Amino acid sequence: MTAWISFTVNGSAVDLELDPMRRLSDVLRDDLGLIGTKIGCNAGDCGACTVRLDGRQVCACLVPAAQAAGADVRTVEGLARPGVVGSPLEFDDLAALQQAFLAAGAAQCGICTPGMLMAADELLERSPVPARPEIEDALGGVLCRCTGYQKIVEAVVAAAVAAEAPVRAERDPAAGGAVGARLPKVDGIARVSGTAVFGSDARPDRMLAVRAVRSPHARARFTIGDLGPLFNRHPGLVRVLTAADVPGQNRYGIYATGKDQPVLAEGEVRHRGEAVCALVADEAVLETIDDAEVPIHWEPLQPLADMTAARAEGAPRLHDHAPGNVLISGRVARGDLTQLTDGAAIAGAAATAAVEIETGFVEHAYIEPEAGYARRIGERIELFVSTQTPYMDRDEVALILGIAPADVRIVPSACGGGFGGKLDLSVHPLIATAAWLLDRPVRAVWSRPESMAASPKRHPARIRASASAGADGRLIGLRFHGDFDTGAYASWGPTVANRVPVHAMGPYAVPNVLATSRAIHTNNPPAGAFRGFGVPQAALAHEALMDDLATQLGIDLLEIRQRNALRAGSITATGQILHASAGLPGCLDALRPHWTRLRADAAAWNAEAAGRRDPRRRGVGLGAMWYGIGNTSMTNPSTLELGIGRDGVPTLYSGAVDIGQGASTVMVQIAADALGVPAATIQLVSGDTDRTADAGKSSASRQTFVSGNAARLAGDDLRRQILQLAEVAGEATIELGPGRAIVIEPNGAPVVINLAELPLVPAHDAAAAAVLVGRGFYDPKTTPLDADGQGDPYETYAFGAQIAMVEVDLELGTTRVIQIVAAHDVGRAINPTQVEGQIHGGIAQGIGFALMEEYIPGRTENLHDYLIPTIGDAPDIVCLLIEDEEPAGPYGAKGVGEPALVPTAPAILGAIRDATGVRITRLPATPDRVRAAIRAQAG
């Protein structure tokens, strides 16, 4: 049944014939093309679809179209000043609120930004100068997984006073001034105006849709029956794909030796949510088909529910390559190992501490679920997908289709958050297979429950660790073992198992170390990459040990870390000499006054609380970290190109995908300074495998260091070529203009290069029409690790430390984080705003890891039951950027994406202990667990 419904959208009248019960969000996006209204959950949990309906903010996914009849609807597209038709918006075209978001760095990936803007727009209309509690209340219905919310609050405050003091942004630093500038994101206008195209925003003509039918069982055998009746009931059903339809290899995976995950299961499923078959039809037809109609006969089997069951005697082996269900083991051994055996006396030890830590699955909870489309173009396939790793995707899709990698093109969409979760294939195999077989564009958009059931998670960990120190607090030895549940398939399990032992002792000099790990298969969802590759779990153990040793020895918690901190000249547990940048001592020095102040504040507050019989207590904790930048002991290259056409416009061809962390902006800043031109003059082509060379994956905190070096080298190369053409050596400035390049030596006459006279030169992008191309290639200097984990696994390391102040209700067990002070050695902050944003976002995810997040298959597959921090959970964050420049880095830079998260949970757990006297060893530290620990201690 349809009806004509009339309303206004952004001031224009709309009259549509449609189903009155259709979601307003779908009408806005699909019928009116207003893709700024984003869909993150379709359940009113995330708020990404927030619009204003007759002035009030509402979740458009919960509003039936009939409710909009006669109403005024305002979307993010209605905020900016209408631009000239066919021209992109400029900064000055944006509303003050959008300008403030862009200038403050309040939009990272941008998927939540339209919803945030609309909620803030309503707030500022009714309360022009809001206080922070008002902002938190107004924006509390919109979730952000990237920013940590602080930049968003700053932006709203800035917009509130914009009428008197217009928003300023460091938009156009002069040549040579880009590095270190707070340059707004080069792709930021699209993020704040709602025009960025994410995976679900594109709808090619003639497209079909594909939806996987997934297993309700964690382990089962199955057969698929006669599909004829299904086709008869649904004549619009085009095809049902099974494993037999996969054209090439029905297996994929991260490592060449770990291609163990099927596109579609072959007679047996190994985890709940595994794809069994796939339905292909028009979207409207798919919506009428219930998965229960597909004739699948199930034979449930007893699943291996956890690592204990997987390692039990007689447990079935899930994969032939994993005896005892152990996928892989890791090991680092150095020094006198006889002192590290069970029960051994540690020579010279004045204190020994031991701890056992357990963590559960953690969901990435990016606000953009997995989405994209594929289309066949002759004998090639093209995918438009949300991804962190286009070249890895290209190679895996080629294997699945049985074609050459060169015949696969990956065009990354805007990526609405990744955090490691979009390093694995998601929609890719099925859209590629269906499009290849049917020669029609095929699209898939995962629902939120499907995303949470089928996507990889953070590895659950069970860790046992012990350490000893002398009377002076100097560490003598450390023993560590961690088991990590890698789930049904390998995914990034080998990376976790190999990275954890390298980092298990923390950022400390320890002469005697034995650190081991195992990745263990179970019938749980695959565990993959998630911001830290197991290091956040390991940090819980080594920081608890440092606290315990300090307490036993009567040494201040910050001081014991300072005494043991790795520094330039130190030798790590893998035998690597840190020749240059190792900034933990500087981080701890920067934290010292805050440590003194916060501990005094907590003590005074607790004394007053005790006097008034308030059950709340405050505590202060400390966590430190280190993190190897890039891949562990393996090649890790990146190639970028910087070209100039006959029009004189420089274009950076960067395969470094921006998932919200600011990689695109950082690459432009670095390349601009290397070439010697203003950053605003450089255009960007990003991620497209037909147009950019392989810059590696956006993970392991590697892009600023590795691809940044490639960008610097590309700029250097292009500058050298221009100076050579001008026959100029030494210092000179370069000015680019239409059809020309002008080189000016100090006290010399300008030399004009007529670009139109130059021949075209080859570039990775065959259509680039470049006359000059600078190329940069960089691969960090690492060595393989031997059987004892000895070698140089990374060229450089990031260091950091954080203080947490928390408030714990001793009766309820609730924990509130009041403030985090974070000091991070970033080498050089290429863009301080982006660096701060990464630190804020990492801290927010660390709070979730510490206090609330635990994924339970089949029970927490939505954003209502699975809790992530909201704006009301975000504490005040103080960022202290320590620039201990790395000589091997681009202009001294390292990376901070993952390091920002690692010390947060240890600091929070230390603060809970300081407030309550109990150490929480099972994460998350939910109120019931905290209260139970307090009661157990009280007897």
Image (tube, grey):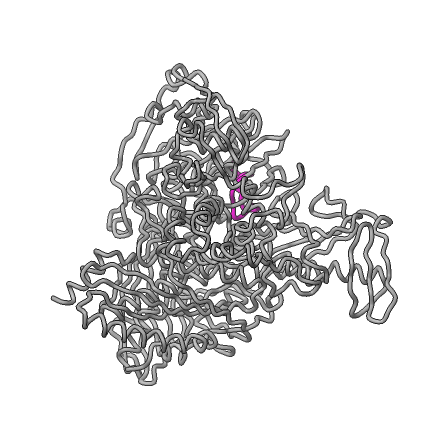
Report the front residue among 424 and 395: 424
Q: Is residue 311 left or right of residue 369?
A: left
**Majority secondary structure in the magenta region:** helix
Residue 315 seen: yes
Which residue is located at x 34 percent, y 64 percent? Answer: 818
Residue 394 seen: no
The spot of residue 338 in percent (x, y) is 32, 75
Q: Is residue 44 left or right of residue 753?
A: left
Rendering quarter of residue 912 = bottom left
The spot of residue 312 in percent (x, y) is 24, 51
Which residue is located at x 47 percent, y 73 percent? Answer: 575
Q: Is residue 828 left or right of residue 359?
A: right
Furthest-top residue in view? 232
Rendering quarter of residue 165 = bottom right
- Give yes or no for residue 547 being in the magenta stretch: no
Above or below, 365 against 735 in this view is above
Q: Is residue 62 left or right of residue 394?
A: left
The spot of residue 413 in percent (x, y) is 55, 42
The spot of residue 403 in percent (x, y) is 58, 36
- Give yes or no for residue 387 being in the magenta stretch: yes
Furthest-left residue in view? 939
Q: Which residues are magenta?
A: 385-400
